Image (spheres, rainbow, N blue to C red):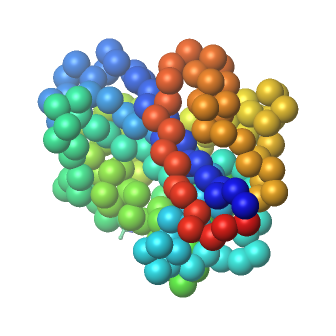
Amino acid sequence: MTKMKQCETWIWILLMTIEFTACQDFDIFVFSEQWPPATCIKGRQEKKTCKMPLVYNYWTIHGLWPCSSSGDNPKYCPGPSFNFSQISNLTEELISYWPDIYDKRSIQGLWNHEWTCHGTCAQTIPATKNERRYFKKNLELIKKFNITSILSNHNVSPSEGNPYSPTIILDILKKDLGHAPLLICIEDEVRF
Ligand SMILES: *[C@@H]1O[C@H](CO)[C@@H](O)[C@H](O)[C@H]1NC(C)=O
Ligand SMILES: *[C@@H]1O[C@H](CO)[C@@H](O)[C@H](O)[C@H]1NC(C)=O
Ligand SMILES: *[C@@H]1O[C@H](CO)[C@@H](O)[C@H](O)[C@H]1NC(C)=O
């Protein structure tokens, strides 16, 4: 019997450093991607259920978070409330790449949360200066840092019956991205 580990990767990337010089509140962005089966396991531990069957067999966006290297990360900044009309013509892409995989939340629940908690704090720089740009930037980043394709280019296609060790995944990402991402693993309590 092996215990299976599902991984979700949180990638730390330094972006647009020049623009940050004017900004006191944050100096890096954390772009976080998740492996949906792992997110479901995490959810189960928090008594959340996933939409089933889980159709996402690829890495999806969790969020883009302004962070401060001092550790004091800005959250819930003043700014316009989430307005779905601003991003309605991105819906198709957002559903594919930034789905809320938990059940019983409106389709816009995750987007609303990510904007309100993190996006509002990113408005001080041009690339993410409003809701629409913030969501577009996320879609750009998931294409640029496509973990699904990076891994499959190295013949790594994890699935329930076919786990890989976090070390293998981390090594591939490190080589490909030129930086070591932070990889957080969720341990499944279910034994196979
Ligand atoms: C939401 O955005 C739409 C489209 O830009 C705009 O017409 C509407 O006034 C906005 N709603 C609010 C509450 O700001
Ligand atoms: C989508 O909507 C925005 C305004 O909310 C507009 O600027 C943009 O041109 C639209 N894009 C398409 C492809 O219709
Ligand atoms: C990532 O790559 C996979 C496989 O190469 C592709 O199917 C998928 O559409 C890509 N995702 C994005 C966000 O471009």
Q: Residue furthest right?
A: 155
- Horizontally, residue 129 falls left or right of residue 91, namely left
Determine whether 26 is above or below 175 in the image. below
- Horizontally, residue 148 falls left or right of residue 98, namely right
Q: Which residue corresponds to the image point at 52% horizontal and 49% vertical from the top-left? A: 185
Q: Residue furthest front?
A: 1
Q: Position of residue 155 (x, y in %)?
A: 84, 32
- Horizontally, residue 132 falls left or right of residue 145, namely left
Q: Residue furthest bottom?
A: 104
Quarter holding the C terminus?
A: bottom right
Q: Position of residue 95 (x, y in %)?
A: 66, 61
Q: Which residue corresponds to the image point at 43% horizontal and 44% vertical from the top-left? A: 64
Quarter holding the N terminus?
A: bottom right
Which quarter of the picture shows residue 171? top right
Q: Which residue corresponds to the image point at 72% horizontal and 42% vertical from the top-left? A: 164
Closer to us: 92 or 104: 104
Q: Position of residue 134 (x, y in %)?
A: 44, 45
Question: Does the rendering let one see residue 47?
Answer: yes
How many circles with numbers are drawn on the protein? 0
Q: Which residue corresponds to the image point at 50% horizontal and 70% vertical from the top-left? A: 43
Determine whether 66 is above or below 83 in the image. above
Question: Does the rendering let one see residue 56?
Answer: no
Q: Position of residue 5 (x, y in %)?
A: 61, 53
